[in-house]
Image (cartoon, coloured by chain):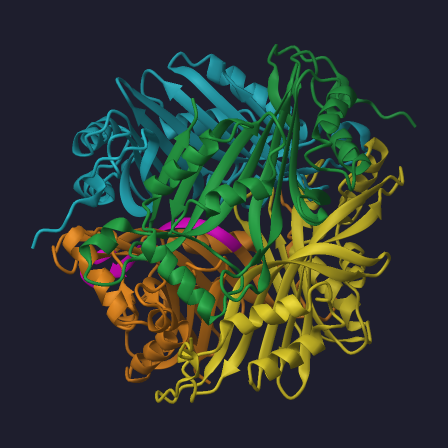
Chain colours: A orange, B green, C yellow, D cyan
């Protein structure tokens, strides 16, 4: 039985499609882990190609075949191979791959030294044309403590969970752990999954000693990124779930 | 042209369906507002009926017709009428109506007295069998400040945005504003959309003066609900977006 | 009592902040409605300004004051005024305003002519520097029916709910209703909140008569946008909740 | 340094707290896999205990310690152990554990026999008092094809992605794969991550040959669950993302 290939039919509307493909494919992947070698996680994957104006449609199933073939090796080192394969199999000049996932890092509590796992939302967003371009995305939860509230109040200061989202492009390998380190060193306090009482005292006082607006966190993270020679582009977003409001404070700095 | 009514066909599987209907219908509604008379908002509506075992299907379009007919009058006073109409039009013994929406209340900042609008996620969840049963749901954002952190630290105390979700059943009319008032009086501090510096000083110090665990907020809200003679059932959930963790603290008390 | 203005302090890190402000402010607004004059809805608002390197922080409460002052007049005609006011009150060279909301349009069923309200997710995204730039966003749910599935199958064809997101910039006023009209005329079938049996027969057969890939819908919408002289930029995204997969098909075309 | 244990203080409000603990803890877990022995995934974990009226608060960090101690062994066979440990360490009469995660099963396409991974949202919801009670939750995406649309239309029939959520309590071990099998055999068609053209023809015609309302799917799944002697309680929810509407059709059957 021969079934007609509708997608390969000629198209006469004369319109290129910038991106066409699959979105929201959930898939188990194995990432490179700076400390432990490998880490299992679940990815949410988007894959697209440029479709020239002459074709009616792309072949969606081939994207999934590529994901299947690279099973267990979907990570930062293999991304160039996957993009090249996508361009070849889909007969496309440009390919896009977006992988979003939770990543876990073991942290020691500051005083008790008890270990626990912190989760971070991360992503690898890659684009391939003549050359490949890769953006690493890491979202780090921290504590922000308001300098104004501390300054004007006789005691206390409002503080809250804040999220610092960092996007970086780099020449030499930058690890997720490196980005986390930069952010956690530049917030009112970093946060933990597990804290005992002496740890809680420590992070409470640390945050009070380091009051920062979202503006301060964004600028401090940018200063640290600027001093890292491997990184040639970044965008930093800070969003603070203000404890005294029902909306968030936000700051964003992007390298030109 | 006569089109067959497939839904009305006999069914022989002998299984009642507890709830069948439409889910996620977005619709503009006009609510009763304690202070201003009326308030426009957008509802997310679910409507179901009990379907007896003898029928193959329900008539989904009739639910939408009922919503349309009651346009501009979908509110707490009309709910009994809508439920009765649903049972009649769908020929059902039981009917369910769930309406979720954002509700806005004007609040004055504590010192500057500047007014702004606070938003609250609310719901009316109704069920009609021989009698009608109505549950009002109000989710109130507040500040929670940790008593342990305050006690053990030389200065400061971690605090954060917390959400108090209250579900109540009542004999005499209880307003959304009444539930908000109870919750806001029983948290470390209530929160505002707009605060100037003297207000920020006030809420910062107020929260520090009123440290509460999620357990404390839940119990204090329950005490206030218990003393309200109109309310004969409640469930109170407190979820605090801990500023020192990437997970939340949670407490729940439900009247037997 | 004089409280120190921490935000106005000098900053020495020499880093401009591209965007700083408030995010996720829920607020009731009144929009212009092409047919009915006005429409009440609820907005989710983000407001930012550019902060020059010399200042430590912005004044977050002023954003909320601006929203309050323009109460009941937050719509496409007033946006330029709000942006100008933001630049003036925040003493900023650039201002951003993003307003997202549900918008409702009455539609008549194709055969029975019964009226019901369809909901559409929409947005006004504005930026002001030397000149103002406004993007209108409209997300239209439609039916997509797969041409390949129809071609190769002896009977039937898989179809599904798909979302067409259109972003446009324009010289002369373009209404939300105009964008909806373009999209609904260029899908396998448009969809409705309320359909009786003759209507259901009509949309079923219409979709089967108009099979379209996400690629087809994107190209057809682009053709229609290209022929509208008011529109000088667009981006069109089509995302189809494939009924035979657990992931989505996606196409995107953006004008250079 | 001795830090005061505020949580252990006496409380005089005389109110038990039904559930208190941690919510939204993300954690990598290793599940039992019917075919492959083990499967790595990421869990979203909630853990609570009953707090007697005499205590001011629970000790939140102990929940995380329990998760850490059971690392790599958080699965259906270990749940009783974890619950017992929770009651012991928290000195509580009742404990709750809710684990939600994505689960992957390899499926062969119906004609080409190509293999791919399907993802399913699942959960283990456990409660321990004098005895333990365990509920398994599995959400299965399927195709639903409307019997009314097929009957009244000259050609075609609207169909769409639908989600069947099954909750079961059982005496002898029921696997996630068993529940998936029951649901996929009782829908218009099951769905796949990867389908080639002959497969697409097969599932298109299969769905057209098996038209089912949400009511039909719910009843057919219930019939299959009723005939499984291991299962003594169930709840079945079917939600269909109607391709002709912007809202969903819903049916729910729960065993008394």
Residues shaded magenta = A23-38
Whether residue A187 is in magenta: the answer is no
Where is residue C249? Give x, y as percent. 58, 53
Instruction: From the viewer's perspective, tell me whether residue C165 is left or right of residue C55.
Output: right
Q: Is residue D134 left or right of residue C224?
A: left
Quadrant where the C terminus of chain B sits is: top left
Q: Using the image, determine if residue A102 lies above or below residue B238.
A: below
Furthest residue toward left: D1
> Is A28 covered by the magenta stretch?
yes
Q: Residue at x 75, y 53 (%)?
A: C187
Residue B160 figure quarter: bottom left
Total numbered labels placed on residues in the image: 0
Residue D165 horizontal/vertical position (percent): 50, 31
C72 vs C240, nearest the viewer:
C72
Tell me the quarter of the image containing the N terminus of chain B.
Answer: top right
- In-front residue for pair A34/D255: D255
Q: Quadrant of residue B25?
A: top right
- The image position of residue A80, as x and y in percent, is 38, 69
Q: At x 34% / y 66%, what residue is drawn?
A: A144
Left or right: residue A6 versus residue A185 is right
Q: Position of residue C83 (x, y in %)?
A: 65, 78
Residue farthest along the front direction in this orientation: C1
Residue D194 in sight here: no
Magenta part mainly helix, strand or loop?
strand
In the rendered view, tell whether residue C167 sits above or below residue D47: below
Which residue shows up at 44% across the image and 41% down it? Answer: D118
């Amino acid at each position: 039985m021969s079934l007609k290939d509708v997608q390969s039919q000629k198209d006469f509307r004369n319109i290129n499609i910038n991106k066409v493909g699959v979105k929201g494919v959930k898939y188990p992947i194995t990432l490179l882990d700076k400390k432990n070698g490998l880490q299992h996680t679940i990815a949410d994957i988007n894959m697209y190609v440029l479709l020239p104006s002459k074709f009616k449609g792309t072949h969606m199933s081939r994207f999934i075949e590529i994901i299947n073939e690279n099973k267990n090796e979907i990570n930062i080192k293999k991304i160039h191979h996957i993009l090249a394969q996508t361009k070849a199999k889909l007969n496309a000049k440009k390919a896009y791959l977006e992988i979003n996932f939770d990543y876990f890092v073991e942290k020691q509590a500051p005083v008790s030294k008890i270990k626990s796992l912190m989760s971070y939302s991360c992503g690898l967003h890659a684009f391939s044309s003549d050359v490949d371009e890769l953006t690493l995305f890491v979202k780090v939860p921290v504590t922000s403590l308001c300098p104004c509230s501390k300054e004007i109040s006789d005691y206390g200061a409002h503080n809250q969970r804040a999220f610092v989202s960092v996007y970086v492009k780099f020449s030499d390998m930058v690890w997720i752990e490196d980005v986390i380190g930069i952010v956690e060193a530049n917030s009112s306090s970093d946060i933990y999954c597990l804290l005992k009482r002496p740890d809680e005292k420590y992070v409470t006082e640390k945050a009070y000693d380091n009051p920062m607006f979202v503006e301060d966190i964004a600028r401090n993270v940018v200063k640290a990124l600027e001093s890292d020679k491997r990184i040639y582009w970044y965008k930093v977003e800070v969003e603070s779930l203000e404890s005294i409001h029902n909306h968030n404070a936000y700051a964003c700095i992007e390298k030109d």
